[in-house]
Image (tube, rainbow, N blue to C red):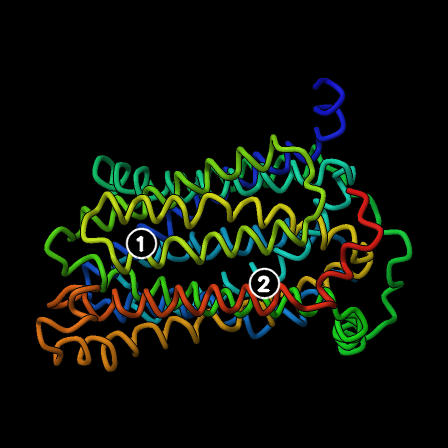
Amino acid sequence: MKETFKELRYFLILWLTQSFSALGSSMTNFALVLWLYGESGSALTTALLSVCSYAPYVLMSIFAGALSDRWDKRRTMLVCDSLAAVCTLIVAALMLSGRLEVWHLYILNAVNGLMNTVQQPASDVAITLLTPPRHFQRVSGLRSFSNSLVTILTPVLATAVMSFFGIFAVFAVDMITFLAAFLSLLLFIRVPDIKGNSDGKESTLSAVKSGLKYLKTNLGILWLILFLAAINLIASMYDAMLPALILPRENGGENALGWVNTFVGIATLAGSIIVTLMPAPKSRIRMICNTLLFSMGTENFLLAFGRSPFIWCVGAVLGWISIPIMNGCLEVIFRTKIPTEMQGRVYSARNTFQFFTIPIGFFLGGFLVDNVFEPLMSGLPADSLPVILFGSGKGAGAAALSFVLGIAGVAVCLVFRGNRHIWKLEDNQEI
């Protein structure tokens, strides 16, 4: 244990302080959503905050990774974190002066999204450089653990701080956590240089092309990314469908939705602990396929047929507890199969291909619930099989969609499980 701690000491400093800073940033984002909804009363207005944050991430990731591979990782993280902190200070100043407008938040969220686009590949590669390969799975579990903890703590802490001290106290917490992460990275962490890295003469466009060329010639990695893109499409449709399924049901409502989201966080927290402590599986590809198949084949069906918060929470646990295990295996494959000097640009190309389906899924999920499944279910007689299975009234259409998503998720897992290029990633697996 002492030797493990020694080998991971720089990663642990980076992980703890960056997680602390992520909690502060998440509290600010949550507080701004509450403030904006209170000011506008519009769900669409608040949802556009996420759209503005996410759009630069999807559109610019492929270029950000190329830049990240050429730039100093530590300096890139320091600059991006600093600019994100400046955005928070601008919001606080505008709010204090009474001049804060909705469009200010949209612009600043877009800037924050752009900073995250550049910062994430730099952070991912820095973690690879700071971590001995035999600890990749453990490191993935720790990162998943902290992300789950941030998800659970953010609404609780942000709401408590706002209630007792006001929104400016949330901004202060964000600044304190930023300073802790910034000073730790500046003073205590040195990220090793990448062997064989670009000398800086390669153009950004050429670097982007090299990342795409790597995926074109490494079909196992590409097909694995496309597999996850298909899963993300279904998962984002699930996210759009979930409130429409739970809020209007007889045993549903805001408290029931809150319990389901809480159990999602608890499940991912438990899964993070499991992946941190478990030994390396014999087949990481099989583990990825099996965990996703288990997730898709349990939660959606329990949500579709369930009529109580207890069943919905059981579905949430079964659907999410294995996701950190899947992510851990995925990270090990990416970090060991992709050359370190290529990881920034390949990770960014991955982000573009893997996550572009998320906004599409959100749109499709909402559209299908409102315009297809709810009208369809409302027009069926009470003794019809769909009404017997999924119930009647508002929310029954979302339950029917959940059933369809379960079938689609299982089908996607089975189709990609048979892809020979993905299984070739098992060759020479050592870690």
Structural crowding at the residue carrying mark 2, measured as other residues with C-alpha within 10 Å and reported as few (<14), some (14–19) or many (≥20): many
* Res 221 → quadrant: bottom right
Image location (x, y in percent) of residue 81: 57, 51
Q: Is residue 15 left or right of residue 112?
A: right
* Res 414 → quadrant: bottom right
Q: Which residue is mark 1?
A: 302
* Res 97 → quadrant: bottom left
Q: Is residue 159 left or right of residue 104?
A: left
Residue drawn at x 70%, y 28% is 9
Structural crowding at the residue carrying mark 1, measured as other residues with C-alpha within 10 Å and reported as few (<14), some (14–19) or many (≥20): many
Q: Which residue is mark 2?
A: 117
Secondary element at tag 2: helix
Residue drawn at x 78%, y 37% is 132
Say if residue 57 shows up in the picture. Answer: no
Callout in the foreground (1, 2): 1
Identified by mark 2, the residue type is: Thr
Q: Is residue 310 left or right of residue 250?
A: right
